[in-house]
Amino acid sequence: MYEELSDDERELAALVRDFADEVVAPRSYEADRTHTLPLDVVARMGELGLFGLPFPEEVGGQGGDYFALCLAIEALGRVDQSIAITLEAGVSLGAMPVFRFGTEEQKRELLPDLLAGRALAAFGLTEPEAGSDAGATRTTARREVSSSGADEWVINGSKQFITNSGTEITRFVTVTAVTGESGGRKEISTIMVPHGTPGFTVEPAYDKVGWNASDTHPLTFQNARVPAGNLLGEEGRGFANFLHILDEGRIAIAALATGAAEGCLEAAIDYAKKRTVFGEVLSSRQHIQFTIARMQARVHNARLAWHHAARLRDAGMPFKVEAAIAKLTSSDAAMDNSRDATQIFGGNGFMNEYPVARHYRDSKILEIGEGTNEVQLLVISRALGLHG
C-alpha cells in the first residue's frame, strides 16, 4: 500500500488507519443499527484536521492536496463507509465549492468552521426528475426585491438523497437552481441556503439499504428567501461548476470504494484462516485461496486507478476520464469483494454483527452515487470517440 507514497503520505495513511480501527470501528455496528451519525466521531475527525486536508493553510486548511484527502477517505472506508462518506461529502460537496467559487467574504465567513469539522455543508443537486440527467433540474430561483427592499433569491423546488443535510452541525445547503434561460437552454446557478431559512424544510431521513449512519434527507423549498449575496460563483455557471466538483468527487468515491474492498479482503483472510470446515481450515481449500487472490487483485487495481486520477488532478492536468475509470473500477471491486467475503463467511456473513454484512449493503450505492457506473461508461466511451 505504501510503496509509492511520500513519508508524509505514509504517516497520514497510518494515522487515519489507526484512528479508524481504534475510534470508528468500535462504534460502527451501533451507529448502523440505530441509523445515527456519531457527531463526536465527526468532531474527532475535525480535530485531526481531516476536513481541512486539501486546503491551503491561509484559509484554515492543512496545506495538503486532494490525494491526501483520498488517503484518509480510503482508510476510513475500510472500516465504516458511512463515516467515510461524511468526510468525503463534507469536503468535496460542502467546503470545496465555497473554496473554489466563493467570494473572499464567503470564504472568510464559512471556511474556518467547515475545515475544522465544527460545521458541515451539503450540496443539493439530485432531484426526483433529475438524477443522472442533472441538466433536467426543475428547482428554480428568481431574483426579487422584498417588501423591505432587500435583494433576494426566491427558491422553489425539491432535492433528494442529500448527504450531511440534516445534522445538528449542518450550516447550509448549496442548491442548484434554474435562474434563467439563454439560447433555449436553462441557466443553472448555485445558491447557498442556510438551515433555518423560512420555506426550507429538511424532510425526515431516508430508511436506506446501507450507509445507515450517514445523514441523508430529501429537501423542499417553498418560496425560501435568501440574500442575493448567497449566490455561489457566477450566475448561470452552476452547471459547469458542479460538473467539475463531481469529477473530483468521483476520485474520492473511488478511494472510499477501494477502502471498502480492502476491508472485505482483510475480513475474508482472517475468517478463512480461523474457520474450520470438515476438519480443515477454510483457507487450505484452493477455491477459497483463489477467491481471496482475486479480491486482492481488485484492491490493487482499484488503488492504482484512483492514485493515478488523484495525481493528475493535483498536477493540474485533465483527469475527467481517469476519474471515471477509477470510480468504475473501484466500485465494482467493492461490490465484488463484499459479495465474495459474505460468501466466505457463509451464514455468519448474513448477520449484521459482522462488518462484511454491512459492507455488502453499503457497497451497492458506490455503483450509483457521484454518477452511476453507466454514466462513467458514457464518459469513457465519449472520450474514445464512440459518440457522434
Image: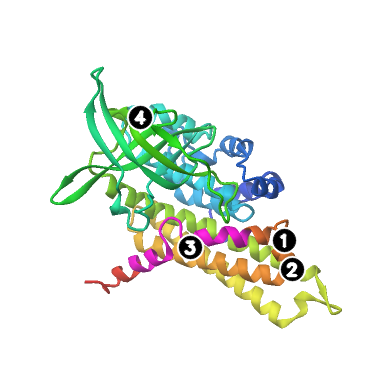
Image height check: is 1 above or below 86? below
Q: Which mark is residue 351?
A: 1
Residue at image x 40%, y 63%? 324
Disc 4 and disc 3: Cα gap in Å?
34 Å
The boundaries of the magenta stretch are 359-379
Which of disc 2 and disc 4 is earlier in sequence? Answer: 4
Mark 1 touches mark 2? (CB < 8 Å)? yes
Q: Counting other residues with Cα less than 10 Å from the Cα at mark 1, is it few (<14), some (14-19), or many (20 or more)?
A: some
Residue 331, compared with residue 195, is above or below; it is below
Q: CA distance from mark 4 to mark 2?
A: 53 Å
The furthest residue to the front: 222
Query: Does residue 90 show up magenta in the picture?
Result: no
Q: Amino acid at mark 2?
A: Gly
Observer-nearest of 179 and 199: 199
Q: Secondary structure at mark 3?
A: helix
Q: Is residue 355 above or below residue 72?
A: below
Q: Which mark is residue 367?
A: 3
Q: Look at the numbered disc 2 and give the secondary structure of its residue.
A: helix
Task: Look at mark 4 in the image and give the residue it sits on.
Answer: 106
User: Which kind of residue does numbered mark 4 sit on?
Assistant: Gln
Q: State yes or no: residue 368 in magenta.
A: yes
Whether residue 310 is visible, yes or no, is: yes
